[in-house]
Amino acid sequence: MPELPEVETVVLSIRDQLVGQKFTNIDVRWPKVLFNFSKQDFINNIVQRNITNVHRRAKFIVISFAEEILAIHLRMTGKLYFSNGKTDEKHISAIIRLDNGQQLVFEDTRKFGRFYYYPSQDFLDEKLGIEPLGDAFTAAWLIENLHCKKRMIKALLLDQRLIAGLGNIYVDECLWQSGIHPETKSNKIPKKNISTLRDSIRNTLELSITARGTTVVNFSYLNGKSGKFSSQLHVFGKDGQPCAICATEIKKKRVAGRGTHFCPSCQKKRY
Ligand SMILES: [Zn+2]
């Protein structure tokens, strides 16, 4: 499933070709792909409008016009790319045409990906938490927001209303790096570990974007491969293998409804 770094990578791969352009039409092959608007709405509200920006908000790809936005969520298998003539016709949900003759293709094998039209980005912002790569995501912010709650840290970090865009793999890696057991109550975590957690979240996401940024050049992500970052994982998927810090066997258990990997020695439980 595409995580924040993959979505950021997709944004970077299409931004320059979209900004300053205009859409002229949409060919909808899978009607459900348009979540809260119709093809006619697209023609009335989006066609011939100048594209002012393309950015990421949580795991949404946001294409901005003057005020309105077209937000795209890739979900499980969505791929958004400029047509290179090798599109898999069977799996295409929609093709958007541009006034310079290019085609933006949305391919989606499982068909869970969706397009959303909103009058402004406020509609997304009110449902989503802080951006972990934004300036406001500081150690002080994280300490305050974890200490005022008494929820299990793993569940809290996965909650998109607190921090937007952190997936299961990244949460496990960052908790391991900061020595926090995934079942620890958020108000019991020492400030020092939360500060490490903040830096770890930031560094892990940035490293992952860099790793995938290099693979997107040859479109290996678009062909379904996971990019180079998977070779840098330390706990996720490593159950039964020795911890890279202390050589204790990595364990796997279900926490917050998700398969969770941790080192029982480096990540002691605190109540
Ligand atoms: Zn360990």
Image (tube, rainbow, N blue to C red):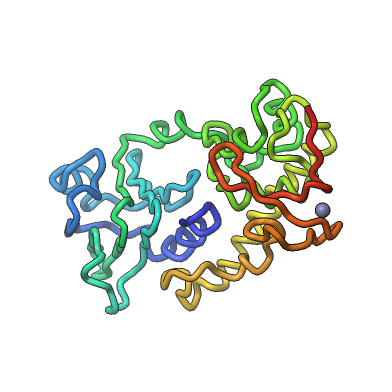
Numbered circles on residues, count:
0
Where does the image place residue 110, in percent across and percent down from the top left?
A: 31, 57
The residue at the point 23 percent across, 46 percent down is 34
The residue at the point 78 percent across, 31 percent down is 189
Where does the image place residue 161, in percent across and percent down from the top left?
A: 52, 32
Where does the image place residue 39, in percent across and percent down from the top left?
A: 15, 48
Give 12 or 162, whichever is nearer the viewer: 162
Give 134 or 267, whichever is nearer the viewer: 267
Whether 150 is drawn above or below 36: the answer is above
Where does the image place residue 96, in percent across and percent down from the top left?
A: 24, 60
The residue at the point 68 percent across, 27 percent down is 145
Q: Quadrant of residue 123?
A: top left
Taking 223 as reference, is 200 left or right?
A: right
Give 2 or 22, whichever is nearer the viewer: 2
Residue 96 seen in render = no
Q: Quadrant of residue 79?
A: bottom left
Residue sticking out furthest to the left: 40
Residue 204 seen in render = yes
The quadrant in which the C terminus is found is: top right
The residue at the point 85 percent across, 37 percent down is 192
Taking 6 as reference, is 66 left or right?
A: left
Taking 208 as reference, is 85 left or right?
A: left
Whether 189 is drawn above or below 87: the answer is above
